[in-house]
Amino acid sequence: MLRIIFLLSLLFALSNASVQDFCVANLKRAETPAGYPCIRPIHVKAKDFVFSGLGTPGNTTNIISAAVTPGFAAQFPGLNGLGLSTARLDLAPKGVIPMHTHPGASEVLFVLDGYITAGFISSANSVYVQTLKPGQVMVFPQGLLHFQINAGKSAAAAFVTFSSASPGLQILDFALFANSLPTELVSGTTFLDPAIVKKLKGVLGGTG
């Protein structure tokens, strides 16, 4: 009898436990390492789970002839707390997303239009490169250096998703040359000629 009472009590407790299905971002509050605070469920609308920003091509008139349009919690409040984020890549002819890494997430790229040559370098320095056509998908493991280049003569576009709300971003060229490390230290640790390092620092805004 006591066992039956215990089981009924347990079931009652479980049925009344609070389950938080989502945490729509309260963008009026500051973001924390755990994401944005939640708005109250009573104020949540269906539109909070819909984002239209990836439907418009980004502006590719820049030095890399490419654009990244983010769909993170700050733009797409319904993603907050779900461990996901998304973005759109647009690459004009000869456009490139430079060698970079996302320390906090793996990435999946889905090609919408055009042809994109993409690849990554493993921690063993093995190289994996593929030219992708519309409808194809490629994955880039967390933390590994990777890139995307327009491989065609017309504009290319892709959607990407990340396995984290905060994937992070470090672009290799900027990490090396857009910093305040003295030229001799960058040269000594990369085996590059100091004159080349100094020139690249000047182009990318580094000092030292």
Image (cartoon, grey):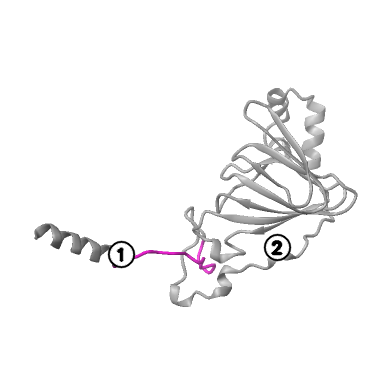
Residue at 63 percent across and 25 percent down: it is 124
State the residue lying farthest toward the right. 153
- Image quadrant assignment for residue 75: bottom right
Let me know if residue 29 is in the magenta part: yes
Which is more foreground, mark 2 or mark 1?
1
Bin the neighbour count of mark 2 within 10 Å (Cα to Cα): few under 14, some 14-19, many 20 and up: some
- Image quadrant assignment for residue 48: bottom right
- Amino acid type, label 1: Ala
Instruction: Tell me residue 12's x, y (percent).
Output: 24, 66
Q: Nearer the viewer, residue 135 or 188?
A: 135
Residue at 19 percent across and 60 percent down: it is 7
Q: Is residue 194 above or below residue 159?
A: above
Label whose residue precedes the other's in the sequence (2 or 1): 1
Bin the neighbour count of mark 1 within 10 Å (Cα to Cα): few under 14, some 14-19, many 20 and up: few
Tell me where the magenta segment starts and ends, as one range. Answer: 16-30
Q: Main secondary structure of the magenta part?
A: loop
Residue at 64 percent across and 67 percent down: it is 51
- Residue denoted by label 1: 17
- Residue denoted by label 2: 54
Q: Is residue 153 left or right of residue 6?
A: right
Q: Which mark is residue 170?
A: none
Q: Nearer the viewer, residue 14 or 100?
A: 14
Instruction: Tell me residue 86's x, y (percent).
Output: 63, 56
Residue at 15 percent across and 59 percent down: it is 6
Let me know if residue 183 is in the magenta part: no
User: Distance between the Cα atoms at labels 2 and 1?
Assistant: 37 Å
Instruction: Tell me residue 181's x, y (percent).
Output: 67, 33
- Amino acid type, label 2: Leu
Q: Is residue 74 above or below residue 44?
A: above
